[in-house]
Image (cartoon, rainbow, N blue to C red):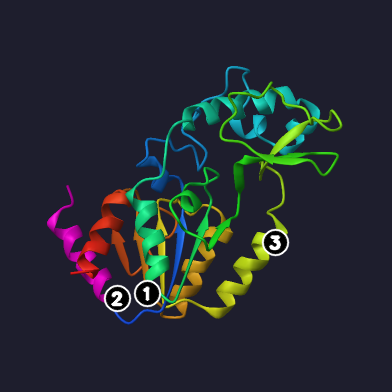
Amino acid sequence: MISKIELEKIHRVSGLLEGCKSILFITGAGISADSGLPTYRGIGGLYNDKATEDGIPIEMALAGEMLKERPEITWKYLSQIEKNCRNVRFNRGHEVIAEMERRFERAWVLTQNIDGFHRAAGSRNVIEIHGNMRKLVCIKCPWRAKVKDYSQLTIPPVCPKCGSIVRPEVVFFGEMLPVKECQILSDELAKGFDIYFSVGTTSVFPYIQQPIIDAHYSKRPTIEINPSETEISHIVDIKINSGAAEALDSIWQEYNR
């Protein structure tokens, strides 16, 4: 249940949307948490503040270097995370963003999530800056495929064409961000947006917090939807202390009255 104070903020956000033509949504694990996914820094809170059963931090298990040296370790934990995501679908928060994209002249989503929920909910202008866990590629040859889940894969999976290790098209720890997505982001940020939303992300990474910081200094409206304090909470114009789906749905209902 959203408090009276938060409802007043939602009313203000609805007013700010009036006259807007362009919107940027920056989303993180919090928006998918409303679908039932755990929130480990965007990939599933199974390992918060503890080592894996192999005695190594999850960041090390899910590192690019580990994938090269011991792919069975990386795939072991990746498949555990995927299993927890299986049979989970997008929620009302994702739907609202997709509906806003259809209504406004220009709307984009910059997401850290690798679950693919934004596209599944109907959004087309999505920058999956950390990739998509269901897109698989061979590390040696051009083979690629998209899978519904990992239930039919041998772990670690190998390429049916050349026998090399297969990996998901995601950014592991220690790896570079995808060039294509970075270029799209740069191009869209250069055009600017009328309003900026940060939804369900702790905004730890510089490329996630920077658009909000730049918008703040450019005097563009900034809104954060997050029940916790984050790296950008002190600079946004409006901070809604609520879950993503509930807040976005309330904003959209208020706007459409």
Residue under numbered circle 3: 180
Which residue is found at the position 69% from the left and 40% from the top? 145
The residue type indicated by label 2 comes to: Leu
Residue 96 in the image: state x and y as whole percent.
34, 58
Residue under numbered circle 1: 221
Q: Is residue 205 above or below residue 220?
A: above
Q: Which mark is residue 16?
A: 2
Where is residue 234, by image quadrant?
bottom left
Of the two numbered discs 2 and 1 in the rendering, the one whose residue sits closer to the viewer? 2
Q: Secondary structure at mark 2?
A: helix
Mark 1 or mark 3: which comes first in sequence? Answer: 3
Mark 3 or mark 2: which comes first in sequence? Answer: 2
Q: Give the camera-side residue of 51 and 246.
A: 246
Where is residue 160, by image quadrant?
top right
Tell me whether the residue at label 2 lies in contact with that at label 1, contact meaning CB atoms closer than 8 angstroms: yes
Give the residues in magenta: 1-17
Q: CA distance from mark 1 to mark 3?
A: 28 Å
Residue 112 in the image: state x and y as whole percent.
53, 50
Which residue is found at the position 33% from the left and 70% from the top? 237
For label 3, the crowd category at 10 Å Cα-Cα, with few meaning under 14, some 14 to 19 and many 20 or more, is: few
